[in-house]
Image: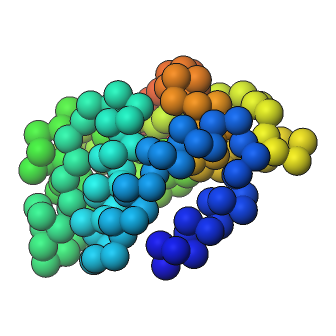
Amino acid sequence: WWQRFRSTLAQSYRRAPFYEETQAFLEPIVSDGRGPLLPFLLQSIGAVAAHLEIRTPLIASSAIDPEHRSRGQERILALCRHEGAAEYLNLPGGRTLYDPALFRHRGTELRFLVPREQPYPQLGGGWSPWLSIIDLLMHLGRQATRAELARCDIATPRADHCS
């Protein structure tokens, strides 16, 4: 799969302004993607975070609850309790999945990342929002991608409704 992925990256982005910079960063990650998926994903996320100077610990939920005793919202709350999390930050798509009142009742503030749509030049003209971090890195480079990530807002939903 990693060779297909590398080929797809080259076909999709070889004319992007920061292709060489991003490809040089991604190559060791992608070429190491031959083992089990979970360690690869954790390593990939960690490498991208480090590349963007985002310092945060990464923990596989299976390391905390290997038997997957809980699911969905209850699983997230159990993980937050285990880690002593005062807040849980989720992507905007989770607004319909989680009950802010229940999170607050359990001692964790539920918040949502709200990216601001900021068009940037992409290959082929036009604008396709909300692609991947790789798309941002290929078109904007490391420093501008960091600045783009800093533009996100954080919203706290009202406890009586979640949309």
Q: Nearer the viewer, residue 13 or 154?
A: 13
Above or below, comparing residue 150 to residue 97 in the picture: above
Q: Is 159 placed above or below 1 here?
A: above
Q: Is residue 144 left or right of residue 86?
A: right
Which residue is outermost to the right? 125
115, 81: nearer the viewer: 115
The relative height of residue 143 versus residue 19 in the rendered view (above or below) is above
Kindly identify the residue that appears in the image at 20 percent across and 33 percent down. Answer: 86
Relative to the observer, which residue lies in front, 112 or 36? 36
* The C terminus, quarter of image: top right
Q: Tell me if 125 is positioned left or right of 32 in this view.
A: right
Residue at 70% in and 35% down:
17
Q: Position of residue 141 (x, y in %)?
A: 58, 31
Residue 76 placement: quadrant:
bottom left
Query: Which residue is at a point 9% across and 50% down the rendered structure image?
Result: 82
Q: Quadrant of residue 20?
A: top right
Q: How is the image coloured?
A: rainbow
Q: Nearer the viewer, residue 63 or 96?
A: 63
Residue 1, how many percent across, how many down? 49, 79
Q: Position of residue 31 (x, y in %)?
A: 39, 65
Whether residue 26 is visible to the viewer of this picture, yes or no, is: yes
Judge from the rendering whether residue 76 lies leftward or rightward of residue 13; answer left or right. Answer: left
Vertical placement of residue 9 versus 109, above or below: below
Q: In this view of the protein, can residue 73 be seen by the observer? A: no
Q: Residue at x 66, y 59 (%)?
A: 10
